[in-house]
Image (cartoon, rainbow, N blue to C red):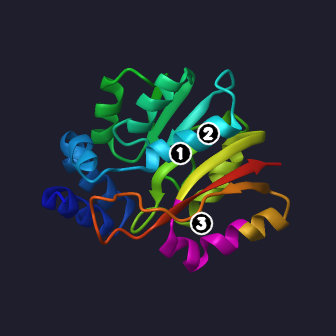
């Protein structure tokens, strides 16, 4: 295990506010790709696999919500999704993402607050590693629903501690209320096998009604 990578993760998990999250990711941005690779980071790969099952590559646009340095954007481009936009809370991370040239646009935004997109804009939103410790919870759902068109999909990783702490129930409640349909839920998996104490996560695929 990379001790530096583990320490960097602990720093961002301990953030106390959106401003704090942004500042900690700004400081990590230049090392992020290398350090996460050392931990065997799986969320972007699994999200891409789920996206390809539920959205043809000819459809778009797609939002990478919490894009960070653009790891998922790189792989979406390889898979043939060419209408992809990025959103992140950290300008430092977005600077790295822009340098990769895989997004049509990179926008600053805070999930859980009003996002800088029109209603019903996206065919899909993918969010890898965002619904996790010290980051985003159920407060992030309403805006993702607003900006996704009817029939579009949300592909979201959710750490099991958050799932069992209320997010799973909220997803079921919103399905019962006719806001979305749960079309797929993966088994729990370890997102960073290079870190033995990693809490498992899962992916939920939600189709907007």
Q: CA distance from mark 1 to mark 2?
A: 6 Å
The reply to whether the magenta stretch includes residue 24 is no
Quadrant for the N terminus, please. Answer: bottom left
Residue beneath label 1, please?
47
Q: Secondary structure at mark 3?
A: helix
Q: Residue furthest bottom?
A: 165
The magenta span reads: 158-171
Tell me which numbered mark, 1 or 3, is placed earlier along the sequence: 1
- Where is residue 169 drawn, in percent x and y? 68, 74
Task: Please tell me whether residue 88 is drawn above or below residue 121 in the rendered image.
Answer: below
Q: Which residue is mark 3?
A: 138
Numbered disc 2: secondary structure: helix
Dividing the picture into quadrants, the one containing residue 194 is bottom left
Check disc 2: other Cα within 10 Å, few if <14, some if 14-19, many if 20+: many
Per the image, is 170 magenta? yes
Query: Is 161 situated left or right of 55 in this image?
Result: left
């Amino acid at each position: 295990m990379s001790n530096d990578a583990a320490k960097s993760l602990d720093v961002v998990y301990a953030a106390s506010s959106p401003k704090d999250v942004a500042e900690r990711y700004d400081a990590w941005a230049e090392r992020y790709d290398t350090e996460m690779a050392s931990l065997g980071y799986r969320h972007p790969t699994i999200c891409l696999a789920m996206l390809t099952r539920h959205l043809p590559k000819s459809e778009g646009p797609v939002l990478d919500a919490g894009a960070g340095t653009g790891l998922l954007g790189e792989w979406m481009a390889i898979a043939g999704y060419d209408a992809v936009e990025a959103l992140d809370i950290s300008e430092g991370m977005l600077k790295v993402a822009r340098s990769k040239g895989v997004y049509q646009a990179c926008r600053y935004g805070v999930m859980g607050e009003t996002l800088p997109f029109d209603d019903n804009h996206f065919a899909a939103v993918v969010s890898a590693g965002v619904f996790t410790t010290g980051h985003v919870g159920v407060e992030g759902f309403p805006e993702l629903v607003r900006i996704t068109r009817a029939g579009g999909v949300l592909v979201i990783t959710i750490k099991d501690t958050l799932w069992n702490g209320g997010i799973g129930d909220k997803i079921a409640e919103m399905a019962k209320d006719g806001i979305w349909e749960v079309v797929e839920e993966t088994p729990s998996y370890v997102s960073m096998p290079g870190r033995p104490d990693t809490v498992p996560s899962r992916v939920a695929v939600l189709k907007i009604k």
